[in-house]
Amino acid sequence: MNIRRMGPADIISVVAIDTAAGILLPWSPNAYARELLKQTTFCWVAEAEGRLAGSLTLWDVVGEGEIANVAVHPDFWRQGIGRALVQTALDKSAELGFPRVMLEGRASNLPAQALYRSFGFEEDGRRRGYYANGEDAILMSTRKTE
């Protein structure tokens, strides 16, 4: 597996990964293209077996980190790709001196929540009915960016 910065040529594959992974609020290709231009956005992709397997976007939100999205293609679930992407984001957060990193995720996505908890994320709250299907979003954060 290789983690590298996302480039414009990766966008269509990243959108396809988001769809395959069941992301409920997927970004458009134009949204990813805009994010790649921002100085406060950091986007990575994971390559495995000769193809893109996952992606993660980290925002610098007024000096704090926010994992805006993370997705791994189902063909690569439970192979450590999500873990490697989150670790990359936390390493960048530590490098930038962020005191905290936040994220939100589907309440039903227990495997993702377990992954985040393994990095020290704790639940901060919920956004009731946040997703179009009526599902709640779980808000999580960690102060451990080292």
Image (spheres, rainbow, N blue to C red):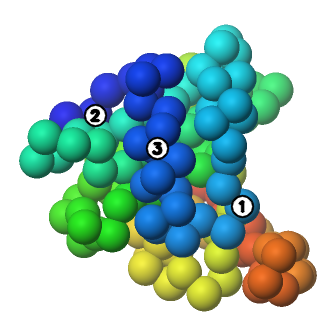
Q: Are marks 2 and 1 in contact (CB under 8 Å)?
A: no
Asked whether residue 111 is in view, the answer is: yes
Residue bearing mark 3:
14
Which residue shows up at 72% across the image and 74% down it?
138
From the viewer's perspective, is residue 95 above or below residue 54? above
Helix, strand or loop under label 3: helix
The answer for how far apart the CA atoms under marks 1 and 3 are is: 14 Å
At label 1, the amino acid type is: Leu
Question: Where 69 sits versus 24, above or below?
Answer: above
Q: What residue is at 46 percent from the left and 43 percent from the top?
A: 14
Sequence-earlier tag: 1 or 3: 3
2 or 1: tag closer to the N-terminus = 2
Q: Residue at x 38, y 58 (%)?
A: 72
Disc 2 versus disc 1: nearer the observer: 1
Quickly name the residue at label 1: 25
In terms of depth relative to the viewer, which is nearer, 67 or 28? Answer: 28
Q: Quadrant of residue 106?
A: bottom right
- Which residue does the numbered mark 2 point to in the structure image? 3
- Look at label 2 and name its amino acid: Ile
